[in-house]
Amino acid sequence: MSIFLHNCRIWDEEGFIEGSGLLIEDGKIRSHQKGKSQLPTNVILYDLHGYTLLPGLIDIHTHGVGDFDTKDASVEGIIKMRELQAADGTTAFLPTLYPAPIKEMRRTMGVIREAGTEGHGAEILGVHLEGPFINPVMRGALGAAYLLPPSVETAKRLIEGFEDLVKLITVSPELEGPELEGIDKLICWCVENGITVSMGHSNATFDEAGMAFKSGAKGATHLFNRMRGFHHREPGISGFSLTEDEMYTEIIADLKHLHPAVIRLVLNIKSRRRILLVSDSVRGAKKKEYGAGPVFLPDGTIAGSAQLLFDGVRNLCDIGVKLEDAVTYASYNPASYSGVSERKGSLKSGYDADILVVDGALNLKGILIRGKWINGRENE
């Protein structure tokens, strides 16, 4: 089936293309064109009345939404997560696992793999393992009983058979493993097996972060949150992430995990190609009773966010960030970081037709995933 979206403006990496249109065939963007004269026969036309087209968002750090969470290890629950994420503008994501017994984490990965082939909704690109190689002192809401010292053998037991699924892992670079095995061996093993390594939940110093970077780590998990505080004599991971040009940096933009002034500081320092907007959403996200900021444990510990990724885009725009930049942080950059930049994160010809239609107030007016409307617009 071919469709043509016209009378709209189209996001690209540097701004917007005014008054253009997109031809979509077989789930892919076929071409950009302004007129209708060279369209194929039987194409379905959609006049978008000047709305803006954005690439679908990609969330690399999300645990749950609504009544569902990865810790449930339920095929039905993961499918519902896919549907709820898609309905809010996230068209692809990495379900993020909490530390748990290895057997349980493996079962959850099996469930996610199965759920990714059934039903409809946002595409599962793989999984993000937020642990178990985490410093217990900086665990936050993560279960202390399931944190482990870094070990290649343990990683093999955890990941064997899921090498194609595990795309990202968060580790604490200051940890030492059995018999003083350095975490550098674990990082190198992950990189050799195609797994991106991020540093987080960590008390690492600036130098320890630098050593992990040299071993292959390339990101910082939810910057400033659950990591050594920035100090002018010991800046830690946060200082390393901000000053190393090649480091990617996750930010949560619910405006509570990070003060708006801190967000502006990060955006002023980092290259726009190295900022990753994430939600860190958990069960309860988008439910009215949880509000629009963090979700807390009974003891007051922040356990994640009640917002999804498009909420973060809106929040950034509310504090003065350009829409084209906010979308870069939430789509283009995570596509590059998670290894799918050849087909996602852009509205170029040949890319998956994962598209958001928004009005001037950033209300979602339509969502396509691989060229199919998911919100009934095809019946208009």
Image (tube, rainbow, N blue to C red):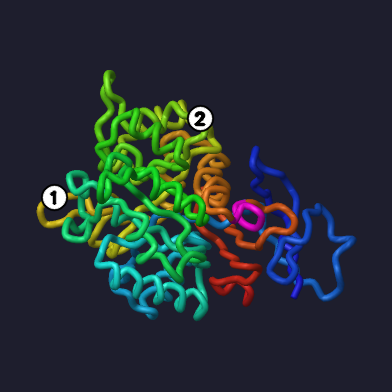
Q: How many C-alpha atoms fall within 10 Å of the one at disc 2: few (<14), some, or many (≥20)?
A: few
Total count of labels: 2
Relative to residue 33, is residue 267 drawn left or right? left
Q: Position of residue 256 (x, y in %)?
A: 28, 42
What's drawn in magenta, residue-wise? 340-345
Majority SS type along the magenta span:
loop
Relative to residue 35, is residue 19 drawn left or right? left
Furthest residue to the front?
Answer: 179
Q: Amino acid at mark 2?
A: Asp
The label on residue 34 is none
Q: Which residue is mark 1?
A: 300
Q: Position of residue 50 (x, y in %)?
A: 66, 52
Q: Amino acid at mark 1?
A: Gly
Relative to residue 164, is residue 22 drawn left or right? right
The kind of secondary structure element at disc 1 is loop
Furthest residue to the left?
Answer: 299
Image quarter where the C terminus lies is: bottom right
Residue drawn at (71%, 52%), measured in percent from left and top?
Answer: 348
Is residue 256 at least partly visible in the picture?
Answer: no
Q: Which residue is mark 2?
A: 245
Q: Is residue 34 a member of the stretch shown in magenta?
A: no
Distance between the alpha carbons at the discs numbered 1 and 2: 35 Å
